[in-house]
Image: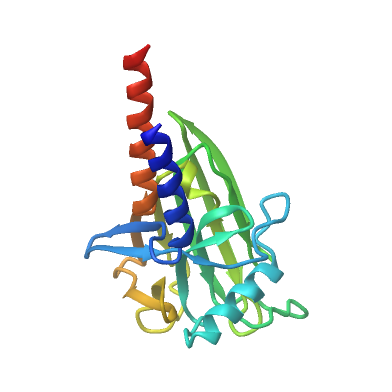
Amino acid sequence: MHLSIGLTTLTTILATTNLVYGDYLTIDTVNGSFDLEAGQVNGILGGNDHAFTMSDRDILAQILQNDGIETEGRLSFLLASTDSGTSLISMFGGANPNDPFGSNPDQYIGISATTGSNTDWFAGGDTGSDIDWYDMGNDTQLVTALLTWDEGQTSAGFAWSDVRAAHNGTTNLYDVDFTEYAPDPIQFITYGDEGWSIAEQAAFSVLGQYAFSHQFVPAPGAIALLALAGLGAGRRRRRA
């Protein structure tokens, strides 16, 4: 009885403090580790056929630019609650709005990304983009892509949906054409009390490569709730 009351109370507390205790990703790179807190981006990644649409990219660019974050000439990564769950999102370039009419792609990025099989992927880019998916076995999937865009006129994007269902993953970027990006063009964006902000910036190696891995971490309150639920289950088993 007491456990049931405690569980109900904890659930109520968590429901009223979800803006304080949020999910986050730990990003590991050759230069160290840092965390990305999740924010809310409504109305994106809700389509079919793995489409990271131009409308999705328009919404995302507008939100980031409203918080003073430059997106054109940048390769942006963030964690956001979307129509497909808490998603790890990559947006390349950041035209606002995208206008594919008469575009002539001049930016290129190669991607090789892996994660568990219990989530989905979304990708999109300008004419000439190419995406392939592979079942690697051992509960692992791989997406490789060449994404193109016309800087200032279009953009490209890639995302893993619902990282709660596949906690770990890796991402490798390849500057396949040694494209002229902005200085330190790779930017990791986090969410906080003041909105979206840049947590870390990086550049490609001299060989035109950049790699990182991610680990999903549930909200601290959610971990406490799961622990309490487990305690209740253990007590029920002992009584039986």
Q: Quadrant of the N terminus?
A: top left
Q: State the image coordinates of residue 120 (x, y, percent, origin top left).
A: 58, 45
Residue 66, image x, y percentages: 55, 86
Along the viewing direction, whichever of 66 and 20 lies nearer the viewer: 20
Q: Determine which quarter of the picture holds residue 203.
A: bottom left
List x then y, in percent, for residue 231.
32, 31
The percent position of residue 204, horizontal first and vertical second, equals: 34, 70
Q: Nearer the viewer, residue 176 or 182?
A: 182
Residue occupying the far front of the picture: 1
Q: Total label count? A: 0
12 vs 111, nearest the viewer: 12
Q: Residue at x 46, y 72 (%)?
A: 75
Left or right: 230, with 31 as reference point: right
Which residue is painted at 64% across and 83% down in the image? 96
Q: Is residue 11 left or right of residue 93?
A: left
- Quarter of the image that includes the C terminus: top left
Q: Write the residue at 32% across / 66% down.
A: 207
Q: Is residue 152 left or right of residue 204?
A: right
